[in-house]
Every structure is written in structure tokens, then in C-alpha cells.
Amino acid sequence: MARQYIDCRDFPDSHCSVALSADTTEELLEAVVQHGTTVHNYEDTPDFRKEIQKHFKQGSPPA
């Protein structure tokens, strides 16, 4: 399975430079939810989980 990632730098309003990556969608989703709820104060809802997965990309984040 290809590695996947999401990068907060893709969301300029976040003012965050964290990028998260994982080998599975499930693992990445859990890491993103943890980061999103603790750092960005998002609520862990089914809608949040569904929306955030739309932004997952294949590969590794750029340096």
C-alpha cells in the first residue's frame, strides 16, 4: 500500500507547519484527528473525519 500524508501547510489559515504520514488510511486518520482536536481545537465528529480524508494525498510530504 502506498504511503499517504496530509500537510497543514496546505491550509494557510492554520498557521501550522506539521505534516503527518502513515502507511494506512486508518492510521493517518487517527493521527490527524488527534492533531486536529488537540492543536486546532476541531471536534472529533463523523463529518470532520469524512472531510479530512478528502485531503489525504499519496506519497510523502514535501520537505
Image (cartoon, rainbow, N blue to C red):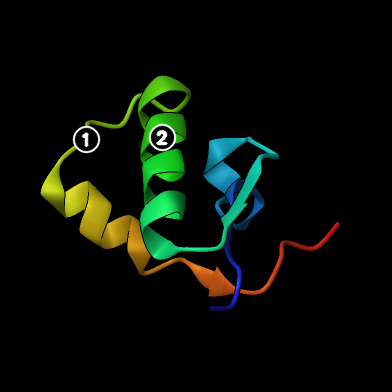
Residue 40's place in the image compared with 45, above or below, is above
Q: Which residue is mark 2?
A: 36
Position in image of residue 57 (x %, y %): 55, 72
Q: Dot 2, crowdedness within 10 Å: few (<14), some or many (≥20)?
A: some
User: Looking at the picture, which amino acid does disc 2 mark?
Assistant: Gly
Position in image of residue 38 (x %, y %): 41, 21
Q: Quadrant of the C terminus?
A: bottom right
Q: Which residue is mark 1?
A: 44
Image point 30% across, 32% down: which residue? 42
State which tag comes first along the sequence, 1 or 2: 2
Position in image of residue 9 (x %, y %): 66, 50
The reply to whether callout 1 and callout 2 are in contact (CB within 8 Å) is: yes
Image point 41% across, 34% down: which residue? 36
**As rendered, which of 57 and 1 lies closer to the eye?**
1
Q: Quick one: SS at disc 1?
A: loop
**As rendered, which of 17 and 57 lies closer to the eye?**
57
